Amino acid sequence: MGLKILVIGSGGREHVIAQKFMQSSLVDSVFCAKGNPGMKKDGIQLVDLKEDDHSGLIDFAEKKKIDWTFVGPEVPLLNGIVDDFKAAGQKIFGPDKAAAMIEGSKDFAKDLMNKYDIPTAGHQTFFDFDQAKAYVEEKGAPIVIKADGLAAGKGVVVAETVEEAADALHDMLEDNRFGESGAKVVVEDFLAGEEYSLLAFVRGEEVYPMTVAQDHKRVFEKDLGPNTGGMGAYSPVPQISEELISESIEKVLKPAAKGMVSDGCPFTGILYAGLIATADGPKVIEFNARFGDPETQVVLQRLESDLVQIIDDLLNERTPDIHWKTSGFSLGVVVAAEGYPGDYEKGIQLPEFSLLDGQRIYYAGVDEKAQQLVSSGGRVYLVEAEGDTLEEAQKKVYELLDSVDTAGTFYRHDIGSKALR
Ligand code: AMP
Ligand code: GLY
């Protein structure tokens, strides 16, 4: 009898995770709560339960005899879904509520980094607008303003001028634009350099790094416009050297995992470090307590080992054997509803794709109407392709996107181009 697995979440990240689970010979069935209708073509079974319905999800896991559950997004982790499942005797992979604070509070993450000498940007925390503004005026621009709590990747303003910084502080501290998340802000030094995402499977002090990826956070080409959840990604990243990756593992991932054990909140799950390659080496801009979206859609294509075996080993006190591809590239481009990350329309009809070998679609904000997929969210889907070179992967994605009608949606045309210059 194969394993029965439940995935929590509904986006493109959960689509690729559930698809990789489906491809494992160890698996009998994969359920996703609540998933999205675009996942059905891969045989993933949708469960109509919300992420915050912990007791409903536990009931489902008990009734269906789920072997273990995998949590995709940060919100259920911070709501303590891992604690609740464990209390009910259900196996679940992800950090508990206390450990998820590494993502849930920038202040918590900064304290950890300061305590364990993990390189990061200099910063100050503020609750008061006038004090924050005075600090920004003294420091000058560029400078970075971050809402302390979760803000779906949108609570960060990289201010080019002191006025822009003051406006962002006003939005967060005086106008409560991010509600509770913005009642406390972190003002951070601006770091210049290439950005990269380094993720790892973590169990207490054990760190198993993944292959590196680069996200594209800004909404428009040439990295212009506001920050988003991510508009596209590719992996690996040729401009990030093996040496820098090793340094990031030794100076960031390992001390973070070890520090959390020492502090009494050991982390088990996927630890994500958002890093900048500065002239002084790697520096952390954020930690996440989960897989990244859209990084996962490209990183997992690079995994040679069976993802189910890895998670099953980590949950059952065995040492996982993890191998990554050593040649080729994967690249993914997000297609978003016009207006995202601001207000956007819903119900846009999505094109039908005829996929060639090595091309894949991962659905995110989609719904079903008369058996047709229509948009229901800001990031609607991602087109991913593999190639022997990054150029080839990029070409395969854009050829596919250029061949269909994408009216009502938009995408960046320069994903991966930084590596090709
Ligand atoms: P975060 O949500 O913290 O990852 O920030 C979103 C984006 O803002 C990052 O991906 C960077 O592009 C940018 N950013 C955040 N912090 C800094 C920093 N200290 N210096 C320069 N850019 C930053
Ligand atoms: N792509 C960035 C994130 O998942 O936070």
Image: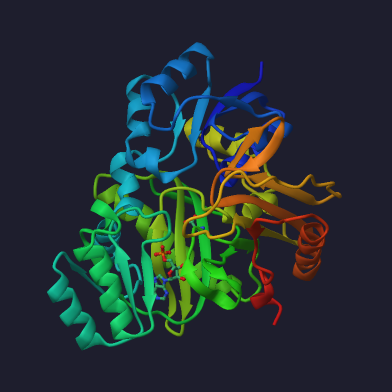
Who is closer to the viewer here, 270 or 402?
402
Task: Name the side, left or right, on which 28 lies relative to 114.
Answer: right
Task: Name the side, left or right, on which 213 lies relative to 417.
Answer: left
Residue at the (81%, 51%) spot, across then down? 358
Residue 272, above or below 138: above
Residue 62, position in %: x, y? 46, 14
Q: Quadrant of the C terminus?
A: bottom right
Residue 311, above or below 288: above
Q: What colour scheme was applied to this rendering of the protein?
A: rainbow
Q: Quadrant of the N terminus?
A: top right
Total tally of numbered discs in the picture: 0
Who is closer to the viewer here, 86 or 179?
179
Q: Quadrant of ligand 1?
A: bottom left
Who is closer to the viewer here, 24 or 336?
336
Q: Quadrant of residue 139?
A: bottom left
Task: Name the side, left or right, on which 198 lies relative to 374.
Answer: left
Residue 64, above or below 187: above
